[in-house]
Amino acid sequence: MTKAIMHGCNGYMGRVISELAEKDPEIEIVAGVDIAGDCRFGYPVFSSLNDCDVQADVIIDFSSAKAVDSLLDYCEANTIPVVLCTTGLSEEQMGRLSETAKKTAVLKSANMSLGINTLLKLLKAAAKVLSPAGFDMEIVEKHHNRKLDAPSGTALALADSLNEALDNQYHYVFDRSQRREKRDEKEIGISAVRGGTIVGEHEVIFAGTDEVIELKHTAFSRAIFGKGALEAAKFLAGKPAGRYDMSDVIEG
């Protein structure tokens, strides 16, 4: 059984992951770390990783960007793998992540959903067939009205997947309101919708002559990200130092 430390255990996703782990016979949360140090799930909670004296195979992080620097320091010093789910990291922190990966296993993905990462793989195959046949590619993403960034990181990851499959020949267009010209055949359009309590919806449209193919992923709750994080933790435990992402988890 994989033993994990939940970094940010009292945050929303920390609680979700702890609940999911209780039902998963292959992984156990043996300790938590959170500045709000109360215990809700039966495992000990520490105010910092440096205070944690519980041995584990991997750390799952869903905390905040400001907590990531000390997390990476700890993982590097103790050569413990980490599934890094916190978003909003600076370029400097991303560089620091790469340095840490030279000492221990680090998994970081734009989206932890198994479904989204399977879609990324499917898109590469579809783009190689449909783009040369003249199909235009568009992405529409929808999120709740409290989301600050647009387009979403996942929408950009979907666009990157299409573009990488096509030798990065395409450019992205986020707004056509100031343009009066026909669509460039080498563009990928990305549109963002914000409203209500939409957890997350991403649709990729391949529009050809007299036919349209749509590939769509809908998230009904954020529990899908917790499930992906647990699968990533089980995969990462015991892996050699290096950078990993969810595609590695899917491919096994």
Image (cartoon, rainbow, N blue to C red):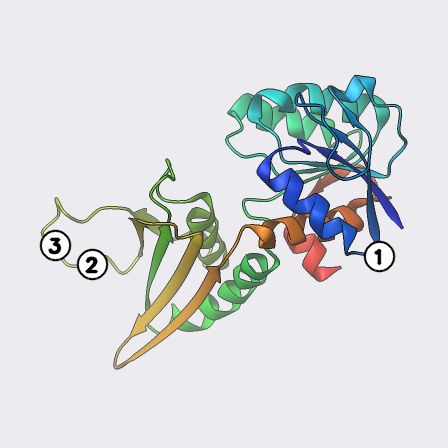
Q: Amino acid at mark 3?
A: Glu
Q: Quadrant of residue 10?
A: top right
Q: Is residue 198 left or right of residue 83?
A: left
How many dots with numbers?
3
Q: Is residue 244 left or right of residue 88?
A: right
Farthest residue to the bottom: give it: 210
| Quarter occupied by the C terminus | bottom right
In the drawing, what numbered circle is on residue 181?
3
Q: Is residue 213 above or below residue 72?
A: below
Q: Amino acid at mark 1?
A: Pro
What residue does disc 2 label?
183
Badge 1 or badge 2: first in the primary sequence: 1
Cα–Cα gap, marks 2 and 3: 7 Å
Cα–Cα gap, marks 3 and 1: 57 Å
Position of residue 195 measured from the top left corner of the image (x, y, whole percent): 30, 49
* Residue beneath the point at 15% across and 59% down: 182
What residue does disc 1 label?
25
In the foreground, 227 or 153: 227
Few, some or many residues within 10 Å of mark 3 (<14, 14–19, 20+): few
Q: Is residue 150 above or below residue 248?
A: above
Q: Amino acid at mark 2?
A: Arg
Disc 2 + disc 3, Cβ < 8 Å: no
Disc 3 + disc 1, Cβ < 8 Å: no
